[in-house]
Image (cartoon, helix red, strand yellow):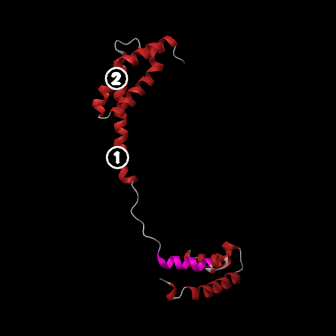
Amino acid sequence: MSTPPQHLDEVRELYAGTYRRLVGIVALAAGSRADAEECVQEAFVRLIPRWSTVRRYDDPEAWVRLVAFRLLSSRWRSAAVARRAQPRLAAPAAVPGPDPSVLVLEAALAELPLEQRQVLVLHHLVGLGVDEIADALHLPTGTVKSRLYRGREALRPMLREESVP
């Protein structure tokens, strides 16, 4: 429902006559002129669709002031919640970098064919047995065994003690 033009003129008149005073009052409570301006402006925005009712009040300025103070209270509550949540939202403690031996293993695995990497990872890192790997990859058990053997043999020279920093 739109506000009739004559009512908008009345709201403009109230705004012009009370805005500075309301901002000054709310600023004293807020401790911030910027916060006070935002709250008073928002209160006037909320007044427009309600003007046909509020205009009949003895003191429409009091209604705007009350709404501005409620908006200010809401801001303070939101800020308090954010301050309490801040420690939980803070950056996590520094995470140590990856273990150098893991980096060497990753680099060595990257050198192998995909088929050997798959069976080595499933067997040694996931802990699956040969039969489970065969089922998971739809391979004969003998193929899994030969890929495990070939993969281990290919990794052996790459993972000697001298290779690890």
Instruction: Please identify the dominant SS of the magenta region.
Output: helix
Counting from the top left corner in percent of width and height, residue 153 is at: 62, 88
Residue 67 found in image quarter: top left
Q: Which residue is mark 2?
A: 20
Q: Which residue is mark 1?
A: 83
Residue 16 or 148: which is nearer the viewer?
Answer: 16
64 lies above or below 75: above
In magenta, the rendered stretch is: 99-110
The residue carrying pointer 2 sits among few (fewer than 14), some (14 to 19) or many (20 or more) residues within 10 Å by Cα, namely few
N-term mark: 1 or 2: 2
Residue 34 found in image quarter: top left
32 lies left or right of 122: left
Badge 2 marks a residue whose secondary structure is helix
Question: Which residue is at a point 37% across and 30% down the rendered structure image?
Answer: 71
* Kind of residue indicated by mark 1: Arg
Counting from the top left corner in percent of width and height, residue 16 is at: 39, 18
Counting from the top left corner in percent of width and height, residue 115 is at: 68, 77
134 lies above or below 37: below
Say which of marks 1 and 2 sits in front: 2
Question: Which residue is at a point 45% across and 19% down the rendered structure image?
Answer: 50
Which of the image's four quarters has the N terminus?
top right
Residue 36 found in image quarter: top left
* Kind of residue indicated by mark 2: Arg
